[in-house]
Amino acid sequence: MTLRERVLSTMKSTDTEGAFELYVTRTPGYLWALLFRALHVHPIAVTLMSIVIGCGSSYFFYQSTVEMNLIACGLLIWANWYDCADGQLARMTGQKTLIGRILDGFAGDAWFFCIYYALCLRLTPQWGPWIWLLAAWSGLRCHGRQCAIADYYRNVHLYFLLGGGGSELDNTGKQKQRLSELKWMSRDWFEKLYLSFYTIYTDSQEVQSPMFQRLKAELDAHHGGQLPTGLRERFLEGSRPLMKWCNVLTFDTRVAVLFASALMGHPWIYFVFESTVLEAIRFYTRRKHEHLCYEILSQL
């Protein structure tokens, strides 16, 4: 089996990840995963290392020299390779856990929080408090919604493509039920803590996709949770073109703009890009997906 075939075997689907992800992100991540497997490193340990490296890049983004910013770019790429490696390692070794998935999502949030903070400190002498307001809107409002809905739509696509076992599609109601069973004053407190944050995350995804929630409720109630074959193919046909926009909303495109703007000495451009271009893409993707769900629901 070639290296490409081995990497493909660790990916969820080529529908949700394109050639760029395969060669630039997944292949280096796979090679790291092989090393970690040989060293018997747990996937969660890899995730924690990615958090340290990604957050550490913020110090170099704070600096205004090209050399320091190049180091920052390299560290963030390295952190992303580890972020890919942890999932591939988990699938290789069967060490998949909910806390691992939650930490994996938290890793990216931690990187960008530190980077935004560093960039704001860097730009405060020229912008004053306005850069903090722009970054708060860009990061807290736009970034979170963009990544949440992109992750959700990819998991919806995988759910209908591969079935429940091939997707990480979650349900807020199920998480809340589990939360009610856990007690703060017990050894379950840590699970209750991280599950509380995860429930907020899944709820934010469901709020953005009301038509899909109606479709899923109908499927669960009358169709065993899955679409009939013909409608399943119709859904995948409509969903597949949206996957490239979901990829734009996650890591690669946004960091390309982040790197370019930082190296040019104008990192504020990234905040504007995230607040305008990426928000427009989120709006377009959400609108198309909701319309697709409406069409499928009307044919059930």
Image (cartoon, rainbow, N blue to C red):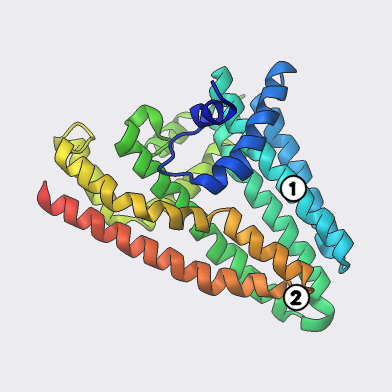
Residue 39 shows up from this direction: yes
Amino acid, disc 2: His
The image quarter containing residue 106 is top right
The image quarter containing residue 51 is top right
Residue underneath mark 1: 54
Q: Residue at x 82, y 71 (%)?
A: 122
**Label 1, label 2: how many angstroms apart (C-alpha)?**
21 Å
Give the secondary structure at mark 2: loop
Amino acid, disc 1: Gly
Q: Residue at x 41, y 46 (%)?
A: 154
The x and y percentages for residue 176 are 42, 39
**Is the N terminus in the top left, top right, bottom left or bottom right quadrant?**
top right
Q: In terms of depth relative to the viewer, which is nearer, 230 or 1?
A: 1
Q: Is residue 187 left or right of residue 261?
A: left
Q: Residue at x 34, y 55 (%)?
A: 209
Q: Residue furthest left?
A: 299
